Image: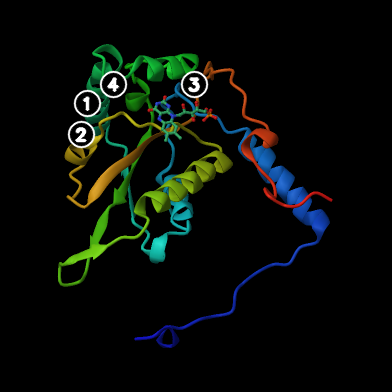
Amino acid sequence: MSAADHPFRPLEFEERTLEEMRQRAQSFYAELDRRRSVRFFRDDPVPRDLIETAIRTASTAPSGAHQQPWTFVAVSDPATKLKIREAAEEEERISYEEGRMSEEWLQALAPLGTDWHKPYLETVPWIVVLFEQAYGHFADGSRKKHYYSKESVGIAAGFFIAALHQMGLCTLTHTPSPMKFLSEILGRPENERPSILFPIGYPARDAVVPDIRRKDLEDVSVWDPGKPEG
Ligand SMILES: Cc1cc2nc3c(=O)[nH]c(=O)nc-3n(C[C@H](O)[C@H](O)[C@H](O)COP(=O)(O)O)c2cc1C
């Protein structure tokens, strides 16, 4: 098999005017700049098709060797949500209160006001847990190497978060660590590693968020390093 044995098709690409590009760029930025991590939810139902569309959107992400090494496990069953809450709170309690987190880590988290209580894990209509497929399987059952699975899953997570925000839902990027309990509760196979837990729903009417600022462009970018002056 060589590359010539695999089909190609013309790229679908819409050329836009600079004016339109700037307008779209600005409105996309403004939309994403309004996204916040939410920790206070209400229990209003969210139809399954919205979650399906968010997962489809996430699955458009680029991935190493196009292996799409991710599994999104969606949970709406209250009994399973309760199990997740109890296990997450136990791990988080040990982390926050029994010294599993360093003093430096606890100080970094202080502005967010988080602690080991995670009531939203029961309140939300949906929990979606994103698993990284650290490796896959060939048809004969043998192990198939996955390339850049962590990076790929991170990008898919970003698409997922953006999709939820764009459709008018809220979520939290939650990593109750260690996350092994999620593999057990959700019955995931050995090749999958829990990556991020997303509680998803509408925000509580009185939801608050930390009053934090994002870095300016100058603080997150460097342009043409090493280019001669003038
Ligand atoms: C990889 C990652 C892990 C995170 N884990 C947690 C978490 O376990 N609990 C939590 O409350 N927030 C968690 N967050 C959310 C961050 O605290 C939040 O994104 C940050 O404070 C910025 O706020 P914003 O998302 O509203 O812009 C996590 C975010 C990322 C990207």
Q: Amino acid at mark 4?
A: Glu
Contact check, label 1 and label 2, Cβ < 8 Å: yes
Quadrant of picture, ligand 1:
top left
Of mark 2 and mark 4, the one earlier in the sequence is: 4
* Classed neighbour count for the residue bearing mark 3: other residues with Cα under 10 Å, few (<14), some (14–19), many (≥20): some
Residue highlighted by disc 1: 87
Q: Is mark 4 within 8 Å of ligand 1?
A: yes
> Could you give the CA–CA distance between mark 3 and mark 2, rounded to whole angstroms?
27 Å
Q: CA separation, marks 3 and 4?
A: 23 Å
Q: In the rendered view, does 134 fall on the left or right side of 160?
A: left
Q: Going 39% across and 66% down the picture, which residue do you hit?
A: 65
Disc 4 crowd rating (10 Å Cα; few below 14, some 14-19, many 20+) is many
Mark 2 is surrounded, within 10 Å at the Cα level, by few (under 14), some (14 to 19) or many (20 or more) other residues, namely: some
User: Label 4, label 1: how many angstroms apart (C-alpha)?
Assistant: 9 Å
Q: Amino acid at mark 1?
A: Ala
The residue indicated by pointer 4 is: 92
Sequence-wise first label, 3 or 4: 4
Q: Earlier in the sequence, mark 4 or mark 1?
A: 1
Give the camera-side residue of 156 and 216.
216
Going from the N terminus, do you reach mark 1 or mark 3 first? Answer: 1
Q: Which image quadrant for residue 179?
A: top left
Q: Which residue is mark 3?
A: 204
Identity of the residue drawn at 68% across and 50% down? 226
Give the colour scheme of this rendering: rainbow
